[in-house]
Image (tube, helix red, strand yellow):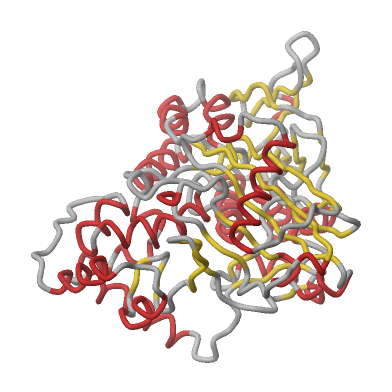
Amino acid sequence: MPHVVVVGGGIAGLAAAWFLGQRAAGAVRVTVLEAGPVVGGKLRVSEVAGLPVDEGAEALLVRRSEAVALTRAVGLGDDVVHPAVQGATLWTRDRLRPMPAGQLMGIPGDLRALAASGTITLPGLARIPLDHVLPRTPVSGDVSVGRFVSARLGREVLDRLVEPVLGGVYAGHADELSLDATIPQLSGAIRVERSLLKGVQQVLGAGARGNAERAPVFASLRGGLGRLPAAVAAASRAEVRTGATVRELRRSPGGWRVVIGPTRSPEVLFADAVVLAVPAPPASRLLRDVAPSAATDLAAIEYASVALVTLAFPRDAVTRPLAGTGFLVPPVEERFVKAATYSSRKWAWLEAADPGVVVVRLSVGRHGEEQDLQHTDEDLAWWAQADLETATDIVDAPLDWRVTRWGGGLPQYAVGHLDRVTRIRRAVAELTGLAVCGAAYDGVGVPACVASADAAVARVLRDLAERRQWGNGSDSRQAEGP
């Protein structure tokens, strides 16, 4: 029976193990190796004030079906939930203002809704219609979101709208992030339409036609999205090992040699195929000798470190209604937090679990601003609470709090990212029985990670089939000893 080793026990690696079990129908042996003490990566749940609250990602984008389909397939379909309320606000110019309707990643398409929101000043609004008469902004290749949006609509739209949205998703800066990689649905439109406004309207119009019933945008799980990894691991029926750091990956006659553990007492596994489902830095180290060009490109992918501060307050601490699901903060406001989620208001199951408690999650940190995280947990919680108090008038001390740090948590899709990913995959494709997947490639959300795992599994199973290892019983463990 062919042996496939999956390196990395985040959601991409666990999804790869599940797809292997499904597609190979039990005809392969699968081992998942996770360096940490538990699987799940950035999907994790723990208690705050006695309530289960996600420590990382809390929602799935429904527009992409991969993650919700996996959730249902592993037996959690009855626990899929959608936000109880919709819409976010922007904490800008000293007050919370509604996020304007008709926008795409913060780029406006409806000027009336934008003007009504009050997020942009009159001079900023007057600048936007120039987009209709300005000469076409040349786009010969990839371009940064910041450069293109500011050229078409002015800097204020970028600073007050686009930056907070991109910061919430990527913890990055619009002047550095690739338009093609971060807003792919707009990439084709800007190469056809001279006007960015018309391009956004086209994309949003197509989306509206495809979702005439205004289906929910996000989904999660009752009890927290952090429940998903354990369910996927169990359903995969793979051997899942934690505390298993892969130190070396080398070719072996007929397959791969995977070295685990410290130099003084290494353990060697032999695999017919390997799926690398780890972030870019460890993937680069493992590929340094077998695919040096891919390793170089992987090493060039930078990461942002962030922290999530979760605060639980008594219900009577909320003296005025909380609007929507939370708020985003433009960097030009120079606040400590970059976003807040009113978890108890957003997820009805959480409020029902304890109506007397209000849970709020606040996000801290952006790419290149790691100094904001060089403080104690107590300091991070205090400063985040101070910003929340200023924005919402919640002045009471929290009943409980938690700080979760994600060092190097979010890959940055810099200009040229898609070309870099193409080169990585082309180099890896030259090696039989090897594939990569995860957030470093095609998207940072859970659906994109699941989709990349699916594609990686298709690749290694195709390689195994071509090598006829399904029928001839060849075993790479016989080819080389430890």
Displayed quadrant of residue 19: bottom right
Displayed quadrant of residue 423: top left
Instruction: Return the residue found at the far top.
Output: 264
Q: Position of residue 212 (x, y in %)?
A: 49, 91
Q: Position of residue 130 (x, y in %)?
A: 15, 70
- Residue 130's place in the image compared with 112, above or below, is above
Q: Position of residue 204 (x, y in %)?
A: 38, 78
- Residue 252's place in the image compared with 430, above or below, is above
Indicate left or right for 427 with 216 as reference: left
Q: Quick check: can you spot residue 26?
A: no
- Residue 291's place in the image compared with 111, above or below, is above
Q: Quick check: can you spot residue 363?
A: yes
The N terminus: image quadrant: top right
Frontmost residue, 44 versus 474: 44
Indicate left or right for 34 with 198 as reference: right
The C terminus: image quadrant: top right
